[in-house]
Image: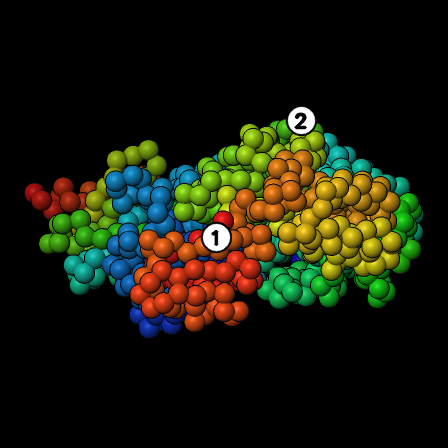
């Protein structure tokens, strides 16, 4: 048995990879070898720790020292001080990871960012080496599959999932057990699919699960295969997730080698295998029927439901399709029981949910909290609030299908039903925070612009309707909004929601509707007063030079592309509002802060 | 892999590699590894502990290192803390003493009195 006295975990998630963690890993490996420590110190590349804003992150056990923002130069110091001499490098520790006023290290789950979290789907992310099946097994991996195959009937498995109250984590929140039950009832060839086509801007939950704990998804799919009576699974994953694809491929080949995928698993008559299909980056392929068309090799377009996939899905056969995060919960439910899972969360939304925190927030990253946690707890207690002391304005949940919720709704406990009642939705779990500098009309326009370019074009309401809405929003942002535009938007939105073929179109108006509901005054200011209260929509701004601050350096005049600024050297300059095209170049160049926009 | 026993075998085999990352309330063996400790020969001592614990497959024991605690003349110093018991400090530890400390103290709960700091100070 190889025993190590210390383990170094280097985050290998996408966030830390882009902030330089592969270089840290190499440097650690090199230094450990040079100092002859490689037999006593284990170096592991893990999945995402969640605290992406403080990346790259390195944790050293057994002390549990949480080093953040590590540079290659720091590695030498950590090896020399911590690993050779046993002295923790306090100055490199994540702020808040020690008890106040001391250098004594807090356990990870007492650090502010993790304190309110409950990691179920992410339990192994940042703990195990995702490219090593043995580590997954050491953390009770494939135990749930073994239990299901040897101790439970198919009905008991479906019953357990139903009782747990697990609902689909991809966004719609359909009860997973019910979905499995539908598919279990039919006969013949069936398929188990995994939706890893995570397309919402700002969402990276599924990515992190696949990168940090790919076997959890494979094991859960095999369990689903046993439950519904299928021998073939497909994972549909975006080609834009290269690390996730690579780790899935490694995981599948390791599982096959161990006989955990393939023929007669654990010596039973159950056989199951999984293949990967890469998505080419169309947002609509996250819609279940479009996704299946794409796996079949057809064009990624949705079709009318019913028939639902559980009746007629992939290759015309009964199919269940679940999201990555849904699968990530399955094994824990089997091992710990339906009651354990149902003990977390609210009455109608059980368990935990992973959110990708982004936008104007201090701790951007990945958090997992019990359902029923309030927006305020996530944004302030875990996320650390808006940076630079700016005032919180709204939070966008659910991506392009969701909506913006204002500060007055911060105390809403998050679950599927509360968010829908508030005019947004759970969605896959993207959470984008906005502060006073964000214009809500502009935000609505951003999301609609996204859906317009991602509309597959099959149905008219989505193809043409969303485009008309975008044209109106563009007009409003450019200062050409007309009386009646708000009503036109509302009318279009109502019709598109009712008549579009799939969820992409049906939910596309949500960002507009929710901003109209909570921030109607901003729309009115744009249309009737021709001003943008947040100072974002350039065409509605007036640039002015403060004569008291202007030194007459002429820099602005020289940089103005249209010659709208005039004035003598060492005298205050003025902007000709008629000529000004509001490009903002002068404001950017001014060294004295004399130019302001209103 | 043909059975659950095979799965359990892999799990047991790998537990040791991931053990440090799991929450554990077990025994801690802490070796002083500051400059003084290393100069006095703490590294072979620590490796001897790791080998011995590894051979016995004791998953609830953590071997860790620490800095200088100020008694450099006694290095290498090793502190052994069993759950719920007072810390025992061994001084001038040599690799050949390790097997006895593990078998008598860590396994059977009887500190090797003659190696402790109390005996050295007499």
* Of residues A300 and A12, the one drawn nearer to the viewer in this rendering: A300
| Residue at numbered disc 2 | A347
Residue A318 at what x, y percent from top left?
A: 88, 50
> Is A23 left, or right, of A401 in this rendering?
left
- Observer-side mark, 1 or 2, equals 1
Q: Residue at x 28, y 53 (%)?
A: A91
Q: Residue at x 20, y 42 (%)?
A: B113
* Of residues A20 and A396, the one drawn nearer to the viewer in this rendering: A396
Q: Residue furthest left?
A: B122
- Label 1 sits on a secondary structure element that is strand
Image position of A181 with respect to A137: above or below: above
Task: Give the label on residue A597, or none.
Answer: 1
> Is A539 left, or right, of B117 in this rendering?
right
How busy is the neighbourhood of tag 2: few (under 14 within 10 Å), some, or many (20 plus)?
Answer: few
Residue A538 at what x, y percent from top left?
A: 56, 56
Q: Residue at x 58, y 52 (%)?
A: A540
Q: Chain of mark 2?
A: A
Q: Residue at x 73, y 66 (%)?
A: A280
C-alpha gap between disc 1 and disc 2: 49 Å
Quadrant in the picture for the C terminus of chain B: top left
> Is A16 left, or right, of A165 in this rendering?
left
Image position of A423 with respect to B57: above or below: above
Task: Answer whether residue A361 is visible to the viewer in this image.
Answer: yes
Task: Give the label on residue A588, or none.
Answer: none
């Amino acid at each position: 048995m190889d025993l190590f006295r210390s383990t170094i975990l280097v985050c290998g998630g996408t966030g830390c990879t882009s902030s330089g963690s592969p270089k840290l890993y190499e440097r650690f490996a090199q230094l450990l070898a040079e100092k002859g420590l490689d037999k006593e110190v284990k170096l592991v590349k893990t999945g995402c720790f969640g605290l992406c804003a403080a990346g790259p992150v390195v944790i050293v056990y057994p002390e549990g020292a949480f080093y953040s923002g590590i540079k290659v130069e720091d590695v030498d110091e950590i090896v020399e001080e911590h690993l050779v001499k046993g002295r923790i490098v306090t100055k490199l520790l994540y702020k808040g990871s020690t008890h106040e006023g001391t250098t004594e290290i807090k356990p990870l789950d007492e650090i502010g960012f993790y304190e309110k979290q409950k990691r179920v789907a992410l339990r192994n992310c940042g703990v195990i080496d995702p490219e090593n099946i043995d580590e997954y097994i050491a953390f009770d991996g494939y135990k749930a599959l073994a239990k299901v195959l040897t101790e439970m009937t198919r009905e008991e498995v479906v019953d357990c999932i139903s009782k747990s109250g697990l609902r689909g984590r991809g966004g719609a929140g359909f009860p997973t057990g019910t979905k499995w039950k539908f598919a279990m009832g039919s006969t013949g060839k069936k398929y188990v699919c995994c939706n890893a086509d995570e397309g919402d801007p700002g969402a990276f939950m599924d990515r992190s699960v696949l990168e940090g704990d790919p076997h959890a998804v494979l094991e859960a799919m095999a369990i689903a295969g046993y439950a519904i009576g299928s021998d073939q699974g497909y994972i549909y994953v975006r080609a834009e997730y290269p690390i996730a694809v690579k780790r899935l491929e490694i995981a599948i080949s390791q599982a096959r080698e161990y006989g955990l995928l393939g023929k007669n698993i654990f010596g039973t008559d159950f056989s199951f295998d999984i293949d990967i299909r890469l998505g080419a980056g169309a947002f609509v392929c996250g819609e279940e029927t479009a996704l299946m068309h794409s796996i079949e090799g057809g064009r990624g377009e949705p079709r009318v439901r019913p028939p639902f996939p559980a009746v007629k899905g992939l290759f015309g056969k009964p199919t269940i399709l679940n999201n990555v995060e849904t699968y990530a919960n399955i094994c824990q439910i089997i091992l710990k029981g339906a009651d354990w899972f149902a003990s977390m969360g609210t009455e109608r939304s059980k368990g935990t949910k992973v959110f990708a925190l982004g936008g104007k927030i201090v701790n951007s990253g990945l958090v997992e909290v019990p359902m029923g946690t309030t927006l305020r707890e996530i944004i302030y207690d875990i996320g650390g609030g808006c940076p630079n002391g700016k005032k919180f304005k709204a939070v966008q949940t659910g991506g392009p299908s969701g909506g913006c919720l204002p500060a007055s709704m911060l105390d809403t406990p998050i679950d599927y039903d509360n968010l829908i009642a508030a005019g947004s939705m759970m969605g896959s779990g993207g959470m984008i925070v906005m502060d006073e500098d964000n214009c809500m009309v502009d935000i609505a326009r951003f999301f609609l612009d996204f859906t317009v370019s991602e509309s597959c074009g099959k149905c008219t309401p989505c193809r043409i309707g969303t485009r008309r809405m975008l044209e109106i929003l563009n007009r409003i942002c450019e200062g050409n909004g007309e009386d009646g535009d708000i009503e036109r938007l509302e009318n279009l939105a109502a019709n598109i929601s009712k008549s579009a073929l799939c969820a992409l179109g049906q939910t596309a108006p949500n960002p507009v509707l929710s901003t109209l509901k909570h921030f109607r005054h901003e729309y009115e200011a744009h249309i009737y007063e021709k001003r943008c209260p947040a100072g974002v929509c350039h065409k509605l701004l007036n640039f002015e030079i403060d004569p008291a601050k202007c030194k007459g350096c002429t820099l602005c005049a020289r940089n103005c592309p249209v010659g709208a600024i005039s004035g003598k050297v060492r005298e205050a300059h003025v902007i000709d509002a008629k000529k000004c095209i509001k490009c903002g170049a002068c404001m950017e160049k001014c060294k004295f802060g004399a130019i302001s926009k209103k | 892999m043909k059975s659950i026993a095979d799965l359990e075998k892999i799990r047991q085999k790998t537990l040791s590699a991931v053990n440090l990352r799991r929450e554990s309330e077990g025994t801690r063996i802490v070796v002083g590894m500051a400059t003084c400790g290393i100069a006095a020969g703490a590294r072979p001592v620590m490796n001897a502990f790791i080998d011995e614990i590894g051979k016995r497959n004791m998953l609830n024991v953590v071997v860790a290192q620490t800095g200088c605690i100020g008694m450099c003349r006694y290095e290498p110093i090793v502190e052994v803390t069993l759950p719920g018991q007072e810390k025992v400090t061994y001084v001038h530890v040599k690799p050949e003493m390790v097997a006895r400390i593990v078998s008598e103290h860590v396994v059977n709960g009887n500190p090797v009195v003659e190696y402790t700091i109390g005996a050295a100070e007499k």
